[in-house]
Amino acid sequence: MKKLLLLVVVMLSGCGTIITVPIDSTPLSKDKATLILYNEQGFPDDFQLVVDKEVVGHISPETPLKVEIEPGSREMYIEVSMLIRRITVKTFEAGKVYYMKLICRIIPFASDVSIEPSEKITNYKVRSHKS
């Protein structure tokens, strides 16, 4: 039993180093909203953010995505194969900064990825898988 527990702990800890990723909260524009999307779960994949059916950028654990968004109601999702994507509808206002985080839920036969609102943050810690 102890060997099984040790194996599970090693598998879950993975390789990599814990790093602190800074977040720049400066708005990109007065005429558009600024979206800051981050992935603090540490999945090593590069994810694409789609807003109103158009890819607007990529996000990885080490690099949060900061993009301008047109004001108004927008449909967003993360484009990723093999996972159920959850569409998020959010209303944006010009000149404001919005914080959201990527959430992956990995469970047998129903894994999904979504974008959820977040409080304002200045940094986050994540396991870096870069060499």
Image (cartoon, rainbow, N blue to C red):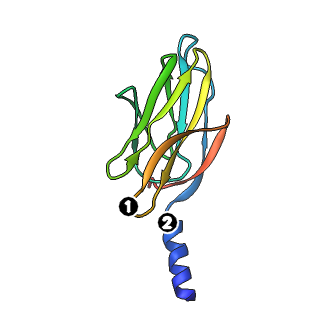
The percent coordinates of residue 16 (x first, y second) are 50, 60
Q: Residues within 10 Å of mark 1 (few under 14, many from 20)?
A: few
The percent coordinates of residue 11 (x first, y second) are 48, 71
Secondary structure, mark 2, is loop
The C terminus lies in which quarter of the figure? bottom left
Give the numbered dot on residue 76.
none
**Residue 25's image quarter?**
top right
Question: Is 120 placed above or below 73 here?
Answer: below
- Disc 1 target residue: 109
Question: Is 131 placed above or below 115 here?
Answer: below
Q: Residue at x 58, y 56 (%)?
A: 18
The percent coordinates of residue 130 (x first, y second) are 45, 53
Q: Are marks 1 and 2 in contact (CB under 8 Å)?
A: no
Report the amino acid beneath label 2. Answer: Gly
Q: Residue at x 42, y 37 (%)?
A: 77
Which of the two discs, 1 and 2, labels the residue nearer the N terminus? 2
Report the amino acid beneath label 1. Answer: Phe
- Disc 2 target residue: 14
Q: Residue at x 63, y 45 (%)?
A: 124
The percent coordinates of residue 102 (x first, y second) are 51, 43
**Residue 36's image quarter?**
top right
Q: Nearer the viewer, mark 1 or mark 2?
A: 1
The one nearer the camera, 19 or 71, is 71
